[in-house]
Image (tube, rainbow, N blue to C red):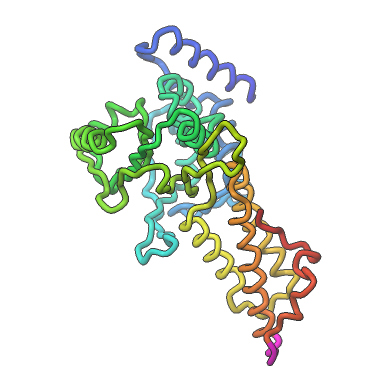
Amino acid sequence: MRNKVSDLQSKLSHAVKQSLDRKFGALYDKIYREDVVLEAWKLVKANKGAPGVDKQDFEYIKDVIGVDQFLAQVREQLKSERYRPQPVLRCYIEKPGKPEKRPLGIPIIFDRVCQMATKLVIEPIFETNFLDCSHGFRPGRSAHDAIRIIGRTITFKGQRIVLDADIVGFFDNIRQDILLKLVERRIADDFVILLWRNGKVVRKQVEQMLGRLGLKLHPDKTRVVKAKDGFDFLGVHFRLCPVRNKKSKLKKYCAVWPSDSSVAKVKQRIRKVIGRRYSLSLEELIKELTPIIRGWNNYHKASRPVLKRMRKLNAFVRERIRIFLKRKYSDQSRGTWRVHNNLVVRLGLYQFG
C-alpha cells in the first residue's frame, strides 16, 4: 500500500518539475483512494493526540466502530462530497514565563484523517515550489537544518546583520482570500533574514509586503541586530564569537546554545513533574523525568551547542530532587546526603549535555 502512495507522490512531483505553472484538474479522486486513506490513518495514529469534540479516541474507533468501517465512512463521505469538517476542540496551553496562553484547536480524528489524505496528495505538488530557505514542516527537513544554515551563513558568508522578525497573530489576521491564492508559497509567522547591510531598509520592505496581506510585524518581538549581539530563533541562541585558537585562520564563528526561553520551558516542565508528588518513589520520579530531559537534550545537541551551558541544568535537576526528597521524608537537614555520589545518575536519570 505504501509503495502505491509513494508512486503517486513521485508522479505528481515529477509532473510539477516539468512545468512549475502546471494546473492539476483531477486530484480530488486521489484523496479518497483506498491506499491513500489507509496511509493517512496510519500516519494520524502514529502521531497519537487527544480526541476532538466527538470524544472518539483511537481505541474507540478500533473497538467500537472498527477501523475498516471507519475508513469506509471516510472514503464514502469524501467520494460523495458530503464531507464537512467538525468544529475543533479549543484548549489553551501555557507559554513559558508569560501570563497569556496559546490557543490550540484539536480536530476530531475523522477530520485529521481527511486532512492527512489531502496532504499526501498535494504536498509533493507544493513542495516543488517552496523556496530552499524554507524548512518548517517540510519532508526531509527540520529545525536543525535551519539552525545549521544560519550558523554557517553567519560564520562563513559574513551576513551578520539579522532581521529577527515575528508577525502579530498571523493566522488570526491574514486575509483568507489572499491566503488561498498564495497557499503554495512560503508561509511563516516568525523568521530571520541574514544580511550584509541595510537591515532597517529591509525591515521596511518586509513591513510593506506584509501590509498587503493584512499583517504587521510585532513591534516588541521584531528587531534588527548584529550577530555579535546575539538573537534567538527556534529555541536556540545564536551569537558571533571570537575563535579562541589563535592559530586558526577563522577568527570568528557563530556559537549556538539553548535560548533562555527554552531553558525556562524545560525547567518549568521539570518543576511540574516533581511538584509535591510525595507518594512517588525516587525511581518512579526518575522514570518520568528522563524522557523529558532526553527529548530536550537531543533537540539541542543536534545543533552542536556549547555543552557547558547545557550541563549546568544537571545541577538544577539534582537540587529540585534534593528539595523533593527533603520534604518527602521531613528531613531536618539539607538532605544533600540523599543525592550524594551521583545517586540519581546511578538510578538512571538522564543527564543534560
Q: Residue at x 50, y 44 (%)?
A: 241
Quarter-wise, where is residue 204 in the image? Answer: top left
Residue 74 seen in the current view:
no
Q: Which residue is most to the top? A: 18
Quarter-wise, where is residue 302 in the image? Answer: top right
Q: Is residue 30 above or below residue 134?
A: above
Q: Residue at x 59, y 21 (%)?
A: 6
Observer-nearest of 194 and 18:
194
Asked if residue 106 is among those painted magenta in the image, a careful observer would answer no
- The span shown in magenta is 329-333
Number of numbered discs: 0
Quarter-wise, where is residue 314 in the image? Answer: bottom right
In the visual, does 153 lie left or right of 325? left
Observer-nearest of 93 and 352:
352
Q: Is residue 247 above or below residue 26?
A: below
What is the x, y in percent for residue 293?
64, 57
Observer-nearest of 58 and 237:
237
Q: What main secondary structure does the magenta stretch of the protein show? A: loop
